[in-house]
Amino acid sequence: MPETRYEPRIRYQGPFLVWWGLLLFLCKLGRLRQLDSELRDEQTEVLANVNALAETQQTTLPVSGTLRHYLVHLGPAPRATLRTRMIRTLIRGKVLDAYRLQGAFVIAVDGTGHLSFARRHCDHCLTQTHGERTYYYHQVLEAKLVTGSGLALSVASEFIDNRHLSQATAASAEARKQDCELKAFARLAVELKKQYPQTPLCIAGDALHACGPVLQICEDNHWHFVLTFKEGRLPAVWQEFQTLLAACPVQVHVVQPQEGLTVEYRWVNDMSYEDDQQRHHTFHAVQCQVRQGESRQFFAWITDWRLTPQNLEGITQQGGRQRWTIENAGFNTQKNGGYELEHVYGRDENLLKSYYLLLQIAHLMWQLVEHGSLLQRVAREYGQSLLGLYGSIRNLARRLLECLRFYRLGAEAFAAARLQIRLDSS
């Protein structure tokens, strides 16, 4: 961690405070005051354990206000850097190689609500008016590495706000519009390319992202893409797609992955599209109909990968439908699984962003614990599943809190030779 505080007055080292902040989310305490009531007890083993984790020698435990001051002073950038280093470690260690699609990591991109207020929170708030009432809110565009096993690991975040309006007083009407997911994606793409310049990526997005600007960004960065295709988003291209499907009756692939379930794929290669900037794009489109009894589900996507009967299932299932992992294992878990994504931890902008990034790192760590081999092995020894043994992930967080309070971690827990990350990719 970089240090920007006035050194003679520093009482708590940066790494110690970062771990202190992470424990807020790792133990799923929910509120800052819980740090003071649950962990700030000199009669427990918390101080020794956090010192061991942070490799520090603090003699006392901080209050939550000390953590708040540190996060405001340092800003969110170091937390984003820490997250990037963690993801790079997983990639370089080939921990995630089993989840590649055609050699690329699937990066799901989607926006979510972060904070909402009845009154204006800051000059950069997004606004929405219903009748005579105006709501103020903040959103964030997330890029998460998603896998078929349920992992949704945050790799980049771009906050959506109206910061640009303060510099657009004499600009065009377009520049005066509120910030949105597509504008944020252009900024997020710059950061994503900077942090992972050589890593092959596949961008998975909803129908909002099936447009010229996103296609051009993917082409410029040499990224693959699998984007949801809907009639209302590209109506002319959709009509052409339906016409060409009728003209290509042999391009049909039917599979039955299980009894009573039938999946039918139909596709068209080499479709062309000219966006509103007169830029030409070529891509391939596929539709998928899932039938199970009386139930019918219909999906469609566009992709830069040329479609064949051999790669249809991988591209549509792993690149297309797997995008929902960012909603289920990502946003839903962070909002309703004890991480309190939508809780306001303060008014300062740097503080809010720092806590958001600490939450992403803590969620990343918990997913490695949940999907890793250590607890899975313990569960198998008792002849149960992980959730069958512990009841829920919340219970695991409670066990962690109890461990930090009443059990001193020994040196053997930190032996580098024994620390390996192995995930179940079956």
Image (tube, grey):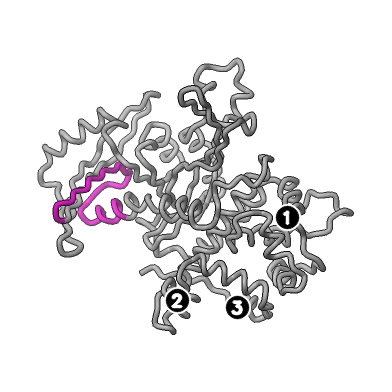
Q: Earlier in the sequence, mark 2 or mark 1?
A: 1
Q: Is residue 424 above or below residue 299?
A: below
Residue type at tag 2? Leu
In this view, the mark in front (2 or 3): 2
For image coordinates 44% across by 73% down, the residue present is 386
Q: Please tell me which residue lies in front, 89 or 385.
A: 385
Q: Please tell me which residue lies in front, 386 or 304.
A: 386
For image coordinates 73% across by 55% down, the residue present is 64
* Residue at the farthest top position: 170
Residue 108 pos. (x, y %): 42, 48
Residue type at tag 3? Ala
Residue 265 shown in magenta: no
Number of numbered discs visible in the structure rendering: 3
Cα distance in 3D space between marks 2 and 3: 28 Å
Label 3, secondary structure: give it: helix
Per the image, the residue denoted by label 2 is 389
For image coordinates 33% across by 43% down, the residue present is 304
Near mark 1 (Cα within 10 A), the count class, few <14, some 14-19 or many ≥20, is: some
Q: Is residue 139 left or right of residue 200?
A: right
Q: Which residues are magenta?
A: 293-317
For image coordinates 61% across by 45% down, the residue present is 344
Per the image, the residue denoted by label 3 is 417
Q: Please tell me which residue lies in front, 232 or 234.
A: 232
Cα distance in 3D space between marks 2 and 1: 33 Å
Quadrant including the C terminus: bottom left
Residue 115 pos. (x, y %): 56, 41
Residue 119 pos. (x, y %): 60, 31
Q: Please tell me which residue lies in front, 86 or 219.
A: 86
